Amino acid sequence: MATYKIAVLPGDGIGQEVIPEALKILQVVGKGAGVGFEFEQGLVGGAAIDETGDPLPEATFRLCEASRAILFGAVGGPKWEDAPHERRPERGLLRLRKELDLFANLRPAKCFPMLVDASPLRRSVVEGTDLMVIRELTGGLYFGEPRGVERMADGSAHAVNTMAYTSREIERVARVAFDVARKRRKRLASVDKANVLVVSQLWREVVTRVGQDYPDVELEHVLVDNCAMALVARPTRFDTIVTENTFGDILSDEAAILAGSMGMLPSASLGGRTALYEPVHGTAPDIAGKGIANPIAAILSVAMLLRYSLDMAGDAERVETAVLRVLEKGYRTADIRQDGTSPVGTGEMGDLIARELSALYS
Ligand code: IPM
Ligand code: MN
């Protein structure tokens, strides 16, 4: 029996609550598909700072490197907000992305038919939305040099971050995006700010050049401000979107609203040898510890893990089907709940999906 070692990094806040539900699902898949999973937990983020002083302890990094895939929860929270820059929980995740070279972040945002009314946007706008946002994840403002803050004797200060990209960094994420678009509806929107930023001019130039290798994919260039507007005005005009790190961070949160809730969005970070899978929602300090968080984003991240790291597309589809069936039956967590229905908690939603999934294997 094939056995896969999975690094499990729940992190902080609701990461601690949704990851156990994702593991329930993987266990059902293991049984049904006849593969073994070896789960090994690692500390990351605030939880790791509290224990070791470091948001990405060496032991966690080694565990990730030695694993077939990484299942990640979320990091951050009010407790660590005042920590110095290098000691913030977020640094743990950023270092992991950089050191594992996870440059392509896939964030699908789909409006499921039964959740059309969960979005604060009108049905006529969100219905039929099916997007894939591909965010460059190891460059741009997040990592560019120089960066830092300089404090003067007179009390004034100067801070700088740099948006920097090499043509190589742009090209490799563009290729991932074209490959993904090719398997979807063959439409790619490259998002930039080429009317102002030289980095974006290079971005546009390189993406256009890469596009010559993909004549079957229709490429358009969209300015980021215009894209932000179009996403909530007419999201169905987009299929696959590719953009740099910061723009992708912002636009993917916006896209979450089209799917009804942040609690629905999975992600995959690819590029290096070991890929990382995480729900997009973050730690949600406002609801953490209450057992009401939506585990679906984490569970759909498991589906992405099966598809991209283990080549188990059929099992990935089963997981997605199980999620849809539970939603079709009317079960909702609080974030996607409909008027007049009482919401189920995190564990109950996980159990319902696990049960549905078992049935799909029998
Ligand atoms: C995300 C998050 C992270 C980011 C934070 C937690 C560092 O917002 O994955 O979108 O900004 O990339
Ligand atoms: Mn974000």
Image: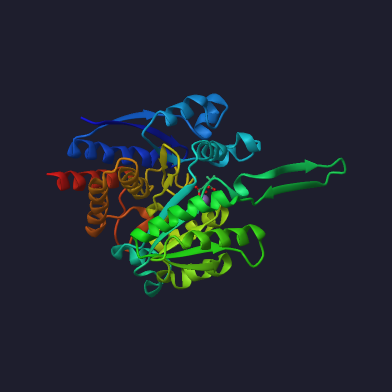
Instruction: Kindly tell me whether residue 286 is visible in this rendering.
Output: no
In the image, residue 249 lies at what x, y percent?
Answer: 53, 53
Q: Residue at x 26, y 44 (%)?
A: 312
In the image, residue 91 lies at what x, y percent?
Answer: 57, 38
* Coloration of the structure image: rainbow
Instruction: Kindly tell me whether residue 296 is visible in this rendering.
Output: yes
Q: Residue at x 34, y 37 (%)?
A: 20
Q: Quadrant of residue 1?
A: top left
Residue 295 falls left or right of residue 84:
left
Residue at the far bottom in the pictured view = 124
Q: Is residue 113 above or below residue 348?
A: below
Q: In this orientation, which residue lies closer to the viewer: 97 or 164? A: 164
Residue 323 falls left or right of residue 284:
left
Residue at the far front in the pictured view = 213
Number of marks in the image? 0
Q: In this orientation, which residue lies closer to the viewer: 283 or 193? A: 193
In the image, residue 100 lies at what x, y percent?
Answer: 49, 37
Residue 302 falls left or right of residue 98:
left
Q: Residue at x 34, y 66 (%)?
A: 116
Q: Is residue 337 above or below residue 64?
A: below
Q: Quadrant of residue 255?
A: bottom left
Quadrant of the snapshot with the C terminus: top left
In the image, residue 15 lies at what x, y percent?
Answer: 42, 40
Residue at the far right in the pictured view = 154
